[in-house]
Image (tube, rainbow, N blue to C red):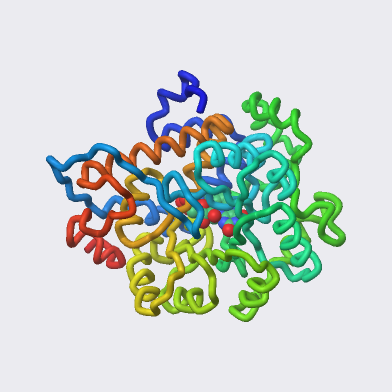
Amino acid sequence: MKDLKPILKKITEIEDLRRIAERKVPRMFYDYVDSGSWTETTYRSNETDFDRIKLRQRVLVDMDNRSLATQMIGESVKMPVAIAPTGFTGMMWADGEIKAAQAAEKFGVPFSLSTMSICSIEDVAENTSAPFWFQLYVMRDQGFMANLIQRAKDANCSALILTADLQVMGQRHKDIKNGLSAPPKPTLANIINLMTKPQWCMNMLGTKRHNFGNIVGHAKGVEDLSSLSSWTAEQFDPRLSWDDVARIKDAWGGKLIIKGIMEPEDAIMAARSGADALVVSNHGGRQLDGALSSISALSDIVQAVHAENSDIEVWLDSGIRSGQDVLKAISLGAKGTMIGRAFLYGLGAYGEDGVRRALELIYNECDISMAFCGHTDINNVTDDILVKGTYENLKIPNY
Ligand SMILES: Cc1cc2nc3c(=O)[nH]c(=O)nc-3n(C[C@H](O)[C@H](O)[C@H](O)COP(=O)(O)O)c2cc1C
């Protein structure tokens, strides 16, 4: 990989990338990323609950030749971290999904493309060579769904992620107040805000991808923006059930990941559905505000899956902002993790280079923390690295 630009060497934590993204990205898109639903308590506890877990320092252990390499659903990964599917990503940076997918490919971790992406499945496939994962939102229009699944197959996507926690939509106050849309509407407030983001505007002028690439021109009656917003509002299917999971699994015929599991009962259903992985996730605190943090839901789900004798992989997302968070999730039994905002901040700050920097920071923090805890191989890490009493009671507030 080519050397980092000098400016990126001074970026030492994900928080640096967040601050720069906040400056560079138009307000409505930055707010769309950096917010949770309603009071944002779940959004906040996703991060703060990681901080409650403490690590055990070990010394005088040979810490040479360390490795974070492992597998997620049989795919070799440089570390147990994948890029989570996120909507509107091409509004954080021009052609954002392509840039993030290229960064992930070069780094050696999987990239997931959202149904609600700006760059289409075909756009990303044409600009990358590693297979990526496609995330499916289930819509009422069955013809459109069948076509979307076929397009993901034609693009050689190596897994389908079924997002299970968006049958109804959580409310983020800022999105309503900002009048979130892609591209932004030419209101006075937006024009004034865009004037302060020259680099973003120049980059956007250089691409034609300003709209939902998987939908516009593909779904019946959606040829332009005005029809898109009413279409999406009507289309998310609130009737989605475990029967549909079986139907989707058959139609897809490949590896299936179910994302958005927070309770052991649902984890058992996911295991019985024959899915290859489930993601313990509360959608980054964007859906049910007042739900547990994702990390506090993990242990019970790992145990339930274990008791079921299932070989479904348990992954975790929501709240990961550092390599230590990844290490803690792995030590509590996750086989892999996904990151949303951590890569989006990098993308908004510096495009592809920023995503690469976000991945490097997470890698280095995870690697060094693992060494401090006396391990050299991520595959051998267990909850032995955690201080007893700091992780068992995460569900109890202020224990
Ligand atoms: C801006 C944004 C957009 C998202 N869009 C989607 C989406 O289109 N599909 C999906 O399954 N999850 C979506 N998510 C949820 C992420 O896949 C992931 O679960 C979440 O970001 C993890 O939390 P984190 O951001 O704290 O890492 C989105 C999250 C964010 C922050």
* Residue placed most toward the observer, 172 or 66: 66
Q: Position of residue 380 (x, y in %)?
A: 29, 55
Q: Position of residue 341 (x, y in %)?
A: 50, 45
Residue lying at 40% horizontally and 47% vertically, measured from the top left: 69
Asked if 201 appears above or below 238 in the picture, the reply is above
Query: Splitting the image into 4 quarters, where does residue 389 fall?
Result: bottom left
Q: Position of residue 229 (x, y in %)?
A: 75, 56
Q: Position of residue 217 (x, y in %)?
A: 84, 52
- 295 vs 145, left or right, is left
Residue lying at 40% horizontally and 53% vertically, measured from the top left: 44
Residue lying at 47% horizontally and 56% vertically, measured from the top left: 72
* Residue placed most toward the observer, 332 or 254: 254
Q: Is residue 49 visible?
A: no
- 343 vs 62, left or right, is right
Asked if 98 appears above or below 134 in the picture, the reply is above
The quadrant the C terminus occupies is bottom left
Query: Splitting the image into 4 quarters, where does residue 209 fall?
Result: top right
- 76 vs 392, left or right, is right
- 387 vs 219, left or right, is left
Q: Is residue 381 visible?
A: yes
Q: Residue furthest left?
A: 60
For the image shown, how many numbered marks are present on the structure? 0
* Residue placed most toward the observer, 231 or 56: 56
Residue lying at 62% horizontally and 36% vertically, measured from the top left: 99
